[in-house]
Amino acid sequence: MHQLASRLGLRTDPTIFFISAGLTLLFVLALVIAPEPIGDAFATGRAWIVTNLGWFFILGVNVWLGFLIWAACSRHGHIRLGPKGSRPEYTNLSWFTMLFAGGIGTVLMFWGVAEPISHFAEPPLQGVTPFSEEAAQDAISIAIYHLGLHTWAIFALPGLAFAYFINRYELPVRVSSVFYPLLREGIHGPVGKAIDIASILGTLFGVAVSLGLGSSQIAAGLDALTGSGTGPGVQVMILAVLTVVAIGSIVVGLDKGVKVLSNLNIGMAVALMIFVLVFGSTLFLLRGIVETFGLYFENLPHLMFWNDMLANENPDNPPWGWQGSWTVFYWAWTVTWSPFIGLFVARISRGRTIREFVFGVLLAPSLFTLVWFSIFGWQAMEFDGLGLAARAAMGESAGEISAAVAESVPLAMFAFFEHFPFTEFIQGFAVVIVAIFFATSSDSASLVVDMLCTGKPTPGPVGQRVFWGAAEGLVAAMLIILAGEAGLTALQQVITVVGLPIFLLVCMMIPSLIRGFAEEDIEHINIGTRPELEAFHPDDDVEIDARSTAGRTPERPAPAE
């Protein structure tokens, strides 16, 4: 394999590269030859996972969030994620836009209207009347729970582990490096390579699902504007065009390509959000933003531990209840992104402290997500008819957006914009935003997958990076074809199965980090020496009462800052 890599001009670990590439192409070939049996296998696997391990996904993410907060607030929080004296390479603004646009920009565009409306029309909590004020409050709280602190905890934990071991220990840029305290030199052996291969495949599938959702939304937007249709053929064509754009950004590189696209994209997304705020029910939305903070933190303790355990008491419910299609899907999908986002965030976070990293990655994007859902979600529910009395007064015009979501989730955002002025322009603007988010996610993932293969923070040869960009597009195209009319359901099945092994890997990052922290020699550094009591009595004839100091335990030196 080393000779083949040399002939092809690759600069990579041949074992990791060729096995990952071979398994990817083998999966694509299998989808071409036998799509139905593979689809059935994923459906069976997903049913087993959500029925038997759904509780594990929910508990696990809560543990991750708690660990991150502990790490940031502990005496280890001041440790810099890099060599001594290192400082951040990017400004806070560029840092935020890059991690956000590479993270869940596409997801917010896809679900910003669709998820609140879905829960508003079909409340997941028992005893809540659809379309009521209570249903609206629950819908906003659940949407932000899914895409707020918990989602960013899934990104932040691998990101912290990668930044700590790769930037501080100067280990190879690979997922296996995170397990150095547990495996030691074994990270370079078969176990380490197996971890890296699994991470590459998980990243490819996670990004491919997002590209599939993004292409379906772009197709829905173009159909609303031009009547071009939304079938798999249209989505594959869109996917092909945007993959070419992403490959162009891959060739340019991180600083020129991804950074420019990220800054442009987040600026356009903010402009779209401000447009909705200004041309929508401005006062209502401003009050909604403030109230949503309270709703989120009021409902979070219940939602984060809610397992839908009584779902089986109703024979009409699926085996594991509502959360199998929502919360478990979200966590399984998001965790497949975690090696990609984690390494990407670690790469752009070199020199930041653990405390700065954790609170920056958790709080800044979560705050933006809360404001985004407050504006799009509340406005969509008001347009649809917020409350039974309001819906009765609206007559036949009530329920237009919820009907659009029931018909096609990707269509939700564009049905929403029909209630605003400059409809066609704004719909086209939204299509462009989704397309750039699409390209940003694809090129970021390709650069990171390439790093996983080379083990170095610098990009590999252009052809090597282009291969991974094309592979992501190919896998996404095959998943779209596999999904067919089933659409989102089929994508949920694939990603839930793929997400389980990645979830287990991320769980093992916590003991590895704890062992790494334990080896930091920060307890034994003295900031200063406590003055002796005699220093406060310079007079020799002042007698010190020995009883004032008798039996006192020496004070422990404060930890280093």
Image (cartoon, rainbow, N blue to C red):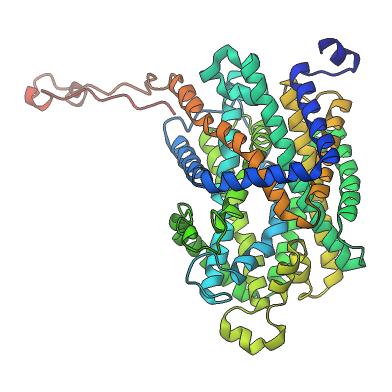
Can you give x and y, in whole percent of width and height, for residue 309 in the image? 46, 55
Answer left or right for 294 relative to 144: left
Q: Quadrant of the C terminus?
A: top left
Q: Is residue 251 above or below residue 176?
A: below
Q: Quadrant of residue 420?
A: bottom right
For the question of whether residue 92 can be seen, the reply is no
Residue under the image location 88 percent in, 64 percent down: 223
Residue under the image location 49 percent in, 58 percent down: 312
Q: Is residue 245 above or below residue 421?
A: above
Q: Nearer the viewer, residue 151 or 15?
A: 15
Can you give x and y, in whole percent of width and height, for residue 168 in the image? 58, 22
- Count the marks: 0
Q: Nearer the viewer, residue 485 or 99?
A: 485
Q: Nearer the viewer, residue 559 or 59?
A: 59
Answer left or right for 233 relative to 152: right
Q: Nearer the viewer, residue 99 or 298?
A: 298
For the question of whether residue 205 can be seen, the reply is yes
Q: Quadrant of the N terminus?
A: top right
Q: Is residue 473 above or below residue 221?
A: above
Can you give x and y, in whole percent of width and height, for residue 290 in the image? 53, 66
Can you give x and y, in whole percent of width and height, for residue 201 in the image? 72, 32
Residue under the image location 44 percent in, 61 percent down: 298
